[in-house]
Amino acid sequence: MDRRQAIKWVMTATAAASVAEIGTFSFASAAETAAKGYGSDPKLNESYNPGDLWPLTFTREQRGTVAILCDLIIPADGRSPSASQLMVPDFIDEWISAPYPRQQEDRKIIVEGLAWLENESRKRFKKEFANSSDQQRRAICDEICDLDKAKRSFKTGATFFAKFRDLAASGFYTTPEGWKDLQYLGNVPLTQFDGPPASVLAYLKLAE
C-alpha cells in the first residue's frame, strides 16, 4: 500500500467513526476549515493528493516546524527513512484539516501546540524553533515528552506533544517502510503450508 492508498484508508476510518498559549505572531494562524467532507461513502477507487478534498491547515512556517519535530520523534536509521522523508507532515496536515469532530479537536491541539512551541523557543533562545539548534530543540521536547511528568506550566506543550507523537507514528507506520521497520509479516502469501503442527492437532484431539 503506497502513501495515497494509506491516506484513503485513513479517510475511510474517519468517515465511519464520524487551552493553549498563542502568541500574536503569524505562526499561530491557520486556514479555516471550509469543506463539508465526503460523507460516509468515499470513493476508494480514486486517488487523492493532500488538499484535494479540503483546504489544508499548515502555513509554510508550521510545515517546517512539523517536519523537524517529526524527525526528532522518528529519525532515519539503518532500517528506515525519517518520518518527514515518508511524507508524515502531509499525513498530519491532511488529518487535522478534515472537517470532522475528532479531526477538528486534534486540529486545535496541534495548531495551538505549535504556537506554544514557537513561544517557548523564542522565550528561551530568542529564535524560532526551526532556527534553534538540535540541542535546543531537544531541551524543549525533553520537558514535554511525558504528559504525566511534565510541569504544570508545560501541560499545554505536553498535551500537544502526546497528540503529535501519536499522529506521527500513525502516519509513519502506515507506510511500507514503516511496516518493514516493525518487521510486520502480514499480507504475505505462504509459499508452502503443510497444515497445523502435529502437537497442536494432538492437543485438540484431532490427530489421527
Image (spheres, helix red, strand yellow):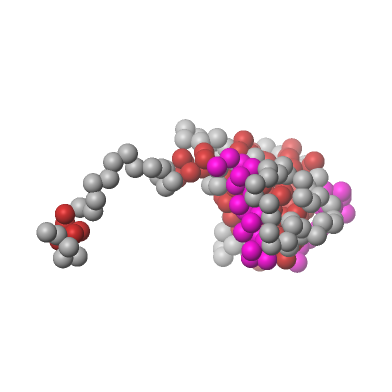
> What's the residue at 72%, 42% (across, down)?
49
> What's the residue at 20%, 59% (across, down)?
200
Provide residue 22's location: percent of width, then percent of height: 81, 58
Q: Say whether residue 151 is magenta.
A: no
Say which of 100 and 168 sits in front.
Answer: 100
Q: Say whether residue 17 is magenta.
A: yes
Identify the image quadrant of the C terminus.
bottom left
Vertical placement of residue 147 versus 82, above or below: below
Identify the image quadrant of the N terminus.
top right
Vertical placement of residue 202 versus 7, above or below: below
In the image, taking residue 84 as reference, residue 205 lies left or right, namely left
In the image, taking residue 87 as reference, residue 53 lies left or right, namely right
Provide residue 55's location: percent of width, then percent of height: 81, 50
Q: Is residue 50 visible?
A: yes
Provide residue 66's location: percent of width, then percent of height: 69, 45
Say which of 93 and 25 sits in front.
Answer: 93
| Span shown in magenta | 1-30
> What's the residue at 47%, 35% (across, down)?
79
Q: Quadrant of residue 199?
A: bottom left
> How many numbered markers are drawn?
0
> What's the residue at 18%, 59% (across, down)?
201
Q: Is residue 123 visible?
A: no
Say which of 32 and 109 sits in front.
Answer: 32
Say which of 136 and 87 sits in front.
Answer: 87
Provide residue 159's location: percent of width, then percent of height: 65, 61
In the image, taking residue 50 as reference, residue 163 lies left or right, namely left
